[in-house]
Amino acid sequence: QVTLVESGGGLTQAGGSLSLSCAAALRTFSSYAMGWFRQAPGKEREFVAAISWRGSTSYVDSVKGRFTISRDNAKNTAYLQINNLKPEDTAIYYCAARMSGIPSTLPSQYSYWGQGTQVTVSS
């Protein structure tokens, strides 16, 4: 059974920072693409960032320059560093794994999902 477990969410003020982690129980973690998505109340789940098995990264325009995705294959863990948080970043953040190793912005392309971690930003 594949398990992705997110951690690091919380409540912070606008302009603050958070570091999210995603620990993956995947035997071949290094071959997976990892993605971060978020879902705000009443909205659809949206792509935030992704990293390929080789380490290439991609971001949605609204977070470029503020969010950084990374991975540590030795620890089977993906990370999302979030800086200069804005109230509109408030959402549940999910990590996801895609077997092909190539990132996608579409949630349907990911096979495995974590349970999510809440990020709340006050103004």
Image: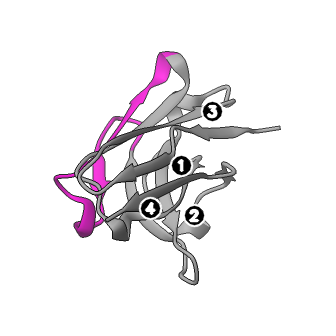
Q: Nearer the viewer, residue 94 or 14?
A: 14
Q: Which residue is mark 1?
A: 100
* Coordinates of residue 16 in the picture (x, y in percent): 28, 47
Label 3 vs 4, first from the N-terminus: 3
Q: Which residues are magenta?
A: 52-74
Q: Amino acid at mark 2?
A: Gln
Residue farthest to the right, as pictured: 1
Q: Residue at x 51, y 45 (%)?
A: 9
Q: Residue at x 35, y 67 (%)?
A: 87
Q: Amino acid at mark 4?
A: Ser
Q: How is the image coloured?
A: one colour
Q: Amino acid at mark 3?
A: Ala
Residue 36 appears anywhere in the view: yes
Q: Which residue is mark 2?
A: 109
Q: Nearer the viewer, residue 85 or 50?
A: 85
Q: Which residue is mark 3?
A: 24
